[in-house]
Image (cartoon, grey):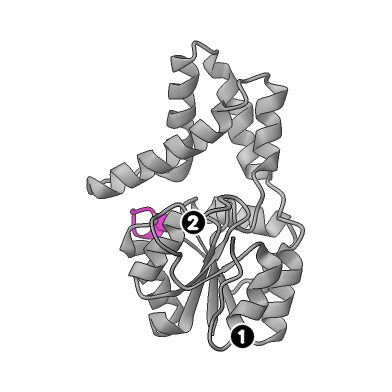
């Protein structure tokens, strides 16, 4: 079986960016508003049939919020730079190692550019685990639109039902499930499933629980 990991938030913690907000003495709630705004902008573009690269979307969303709060837009540059300096979650390496030992093929699928996603993975020392880093740039449409997931399925060369998507964002899990992939929602960021009902597939508190879920028959739910 193949496993696809989302990158930002799932494999890599955003703590470095949050600390940058604190260092810039920006309002503490601005970080959450910014991340939600850039996701909304990416999804709106996809619904409208357009596409903006993730980095450009992140910058535009941050500058808009800074302007609305009458804060200097010069604060945007160091925050955006921190996005390229994220550290992996402490359990990421153990999770990937366990999956490789059990024979899983491992991929990444990110809304960031292929270079940005690859750079993060390489500088973290995790590159040896990945067969490929796939990007929404390739189809000019961001997740959770079906196009990135379908592209990943084609590139991997397996039926969608034999591929699992691991993500810490409910919208990413929802999109992957709609495209026919199996899914594991990592609940440590959102804590509670953000949509009505229960998450499709399985759920784990963190990455440490992912290997067991992928080998469990049938899949079980360990989320909150």
Q: Quadrant of the C terminus?
A: bottom right
Whether 185 is drawn above or below 40: the answer is below
Name the outermost residue toward the left: 48
Indicate whether residue 137 is drawn in magenta: yes
Q: CA distance from mark 1 to mark 2?
A: 23 Å
Quarter where residue 180 is shown: bottom left
Badge 2, how many Cα within 10 Å: few under 14, some, many 20+? Answer: some
Magenta segment? 136-142
- Residue 173, x across and y down, in percent: 45, 63
Whether 103 is drawn above or below 63: the answer is below
**What secondary structure is found at the residue carrying circle 2?**
loop
- Residue 104 in view (yes/no): no
Mark nearer the N terminus (1 vs 2): 2
- Residue at image point 55% right, 57% down: 168
Quarter where residue 139 is shown: bottom left
- Residue at image point 57% right, 57% down: 7
Q: Nearer the viewer, residue 96 or 174?
A: 174
Whether 93 is drawn above or below 66: the answer is below
Q: Nearer the viewer, residue 148 or 222?
A: 222
Q: How many marks?
A: 2
Which residue corresponds to mark 2? Answer: 193
Residue 215, numbered circle:
1
User: Comparing marks 1 and 2, which lies closer to the viewer?
Assistant: 2
């Amino acid at each position: 079986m193949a496993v696809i990991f989302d990158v930002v938030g799932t494999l890599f913690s955003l703590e470095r960016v949050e600390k940058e907000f604190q260092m810039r003495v920006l309002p503490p709630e601005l970080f959450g508003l910014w991340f939600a705004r850039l996701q909304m902008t990416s999804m709106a573009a996809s619904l409208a049939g357009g596409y903006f690269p993730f980095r450009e979307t992140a910058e535009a969303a941050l500058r808009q919020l800074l302007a609305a709060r009458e804060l200097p837009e010069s604060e945007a540059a160091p925050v955006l730079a921190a996005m390229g300096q994220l550290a992996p979650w402490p359990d990421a390496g153990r999770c990937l190692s366990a999956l490789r030992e059990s024979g899983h093929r491992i991929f990444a699928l990110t809304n960031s550019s292929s270079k940005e996603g690859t750079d993060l993975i390489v500088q973290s020392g995790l590159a040896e685990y990945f067969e490929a880093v796939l990007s929404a740039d390739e189809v000019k449409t961001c997740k959770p639109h079906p196009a990135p997931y379908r592209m990943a399925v084609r590139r991997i060369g397996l039926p969608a039902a034999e591929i699992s998507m691991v993500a810490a964002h409910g919208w990413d899990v929802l999109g992957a499930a709609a495209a026919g992939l199996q899914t594991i929602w990592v609940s440590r960021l959102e804590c509670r499933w953000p949509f009505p009902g229960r998450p499709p597939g399985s759920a784990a508190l963190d990455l440490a629980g992912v290997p067991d879920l992928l080998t469990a028959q049938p899949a079980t739910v360990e989320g909150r």
